[in-house]
Every structure is written in structure tokens, then in C-alpha cells.
Amino acid sequence: MFQKAQRKQVKLKLGISGPSGSGKTYSALRIAKGLLPLGAKIALIDTENRSASLYADVQDMPSFDTAELEPPYTVDKYIAAIEQAIKQKYDLLIVDSVSHVWSGEGGLLQEKEIMDARGGNSFTNWAKMTPKWNKFVSTILHSDIHMICTMRSKQEHALTQNDKGKSEVKKMGMAPQVREGFEYELTAVFDMDMTHHAQASKDRTNIFDGKTWKPNEKTGEEILKWMSTGAPSQTRSSQPSTTGSPVSGSLSADPSQPSSASAAPQVNSPTSAAAAPDMSAAKGVAASPADWKATKEDLTRLTQLGNEKGWSGPDLSAYMEQRFQKTKLSLFTKEEYDQLCGIIRSRSAKEAKESWQMYVESEKLRTEDPNWDDMGSRVGT
């Protein structure tokens, strides 16, 4: 039943978050080149108006194929494209970006807004969205292919009181435009800024913790080295979904095969070029988090981060207990500590509390009401 815990070799699930122009796509391609052997196949799901194709002829950029998704950005369209990448035996898939399935045209947020406009309880409508989102996340996590997911981020603001007791709007940091918690499902998440530098808001590899660097092939090489040290894992077969909606295009990159209206998006080789910034390497050494214990320095770091982002001491204590059911930092695992730092860095205390309460309420409605089926629809309606 129980066995000695050991890290297994698994497929990479990396997230790259940042505002438009921060270098998410460029960094994803450079990391992919360092991660894979020469001649490996890279696929890219493009929802960013063909922007990835601009890097096709850039010097030192890897060769890659694209599949363009058009609105509406539904969960089933994304899943169909992911399954096609696996079927066509690509070694790595870049999803550029996952934000559209959440906040884009025809995404889950817009779908819920339409349902709200028709009437009904807002929390009940959330319960219909949760199974769809969970299905999308599960497909990413369980697919037998390396994946890099880019996420758009936006500036968050909060109304706070200054030292004179007057209200003022304060910038609270960048928040990824996906459902809260998605970034913590991944192996690591790199937050990009407008100077094309990255910081790791979540890092199971422990290679990049506390560093600021420009991602490139060396980043992929370091991740590959970390992944290669795990015990061999049985290959997980990815079962194609029978519920994915059709998206236009061809099933194959081979132009000799006919196109089909019910197939996955067409895979094309990009041809146009654009200049891109020079990226340099990051250096780090992996360390095991198994025996990690929070130190006074960790507490100081968390407190300073909270002060910078407008979290008071009571805010922090209340959220630790609400979200993690823990009142002391010494009880946290390394992963939970990194997750908490990432939340504080990207959201105000009020936003974090409200977002978690909404998630809990939607899950409660879904699990307690026997009239909800697995797809989040009321049975018989």
C-alpha cells in the first residue's frame, strides 16, 4: 500500500505569466529549445493573432508548427487541439495563451456573464463553470507531453489608507488572467516583466527560487537536468476526449492529407520573422524540499512581501487559516509557502479572500446538490 516516496520523471507543465510585450512567447520557445534534443517536434496553439509566427526566422529560434484557434475560445476547442498534438507525436506543446479560455471571447467568464444576464443565482452559475475548468486543467496535467502555458497578466489595484489616514489607490502587483489556483497546479511558474526578466512565483524544482533572470535555452537545460534525476515513470496514455467540440482545419501537418471541418485546427509552419530581445542564462542548483522548514528569514520575507502589497498582519493570519487551515508558518510545506507568497504577490488581501470564498461556495453547491451532473448542468433541464 504505502511505498517510500521518490520523485518520478514526469512531463513538464510550466507556466509563464506576464503583460503583453514581456516576452512570454519568445521565452517559451527558447526554453523549449534547451529542454528538447535536436530534431524534436514543437507545436504551438496560437490564440494571439499569429504573433508566435513572427519568431519563425529569428536566429537561434527552434523550428515549430502552429495551430491557430479562433473565437469562441471554448474548453472543448483547447482540449481537441491538445489531443491532436499528442496524436501527431509532438514532443512539446506551447499553449499561447490559456487566458483566452478563461477571460477571452467565448471563454468561461463570458459564458457565466451570459448566464447571469438570463437570471439565476450567481454562485449556482459558477458551479456550472467549475467542472468545465477542472476538465481543462486535468487535460493539461495528465497529457503525456511536455507543455508550456503562457498567461496574460494585468495590474491589480486596491483602495488603501495611507499614513495620513486618507484613501488612495495602490498598485498590488500583476495577477494572471486565469482562475485562481491554476498556476499552483504546474511544475513552475515564471512571472515576466517588461524588461524580459523572470521571477519564479512557484517552483517545485527549487532551481529558480529567489532569482531574477532572462529565460533562454539554459533555463530549459537546467529544467531537463532536474527532470532527469527522478525515477523512471510509466508512460501515461492520453485518452482522446469524446466530448471535444470540432474546430476547423486539418488533422495533420502533412499538406497532402485532406482537411476536415470536424478536425482539430490546422498545423502550419510559420514563415515571417521579427526581431527579439537578447536573452541570457540563469544559473541555479536544485535542492530537495522534503525536509524544508520555515525559518525566521522565511517569515521576514513573507512579512515584507505582505507590507509591500498592502496585507496587514491580521489579513495574513486570517488567510492562512482560511485557505490552508494552518495558523503557524512552521506547519507549512515548501510548496504551500511558495503558493502563499505567489498569492500575496499577485492579489490584494480582499481579492484573495473573495476569490477563495467564491471558489469554496461554487464547489459546495456542486457537491451538495444531487441534481448537478458531472458537466455542471442541472439534470432534467
Image (cartoon, helix red, strand yellow):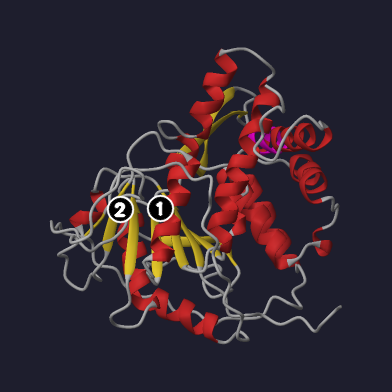
Asked if residue 353 is among those painted magenta in the image, a careful observer would answer yes
Quadrant of the rendered image containing residue 214: bottom left
Q: Nearer the viewer, residue 112 or 320?
A: 112
- Circle 1 residues within 10 Å: few <14, some 14–19, many ≥20: many
Decide: few, some or many residues near mark 2? Use Cα within 10 Å; few <14, some 14-19, many ≥20.
many
Q: Secondary structure at mark 2?
A: strand
Q: Which residues are magenta?
A: 350-356
Query: Which one is nearer the viewer's eye here, 15 or 254?
Result: 254
Provide the major secondary structure of the magenta segment. helix
Drawn side of residue 258 relative to residue 207, left or right? left
Whichever of labels 2 and 1 marks the residue nearer the N terminus, that label is: 2
Callout 2 touching callout 1 (CB < 8 Å): yes
Which residue type does callout 2 highlight? Ala
Residue to which mark 2 is pinned: 67
The span from disc 2 to disc 1 (Cα, nearest Å) is 8 Å
Look at mark 1 in the image and give the residue it sits on: 81
- Report helix, strand or loop for mark 1: helix
Observer able to see residue 149: no
| Residue 222 point in image, percent of width and height | 45, 80
Side of 95 relative to 333 (left or right): left
Figure check: 81 above or below 353 = below
Specify the quadrant of the image occupied by residue 124.
Answer: top right
Name the quadrant of the N terminus.
Answer: bottom right
- Give the amino acid at mark 1: Ala
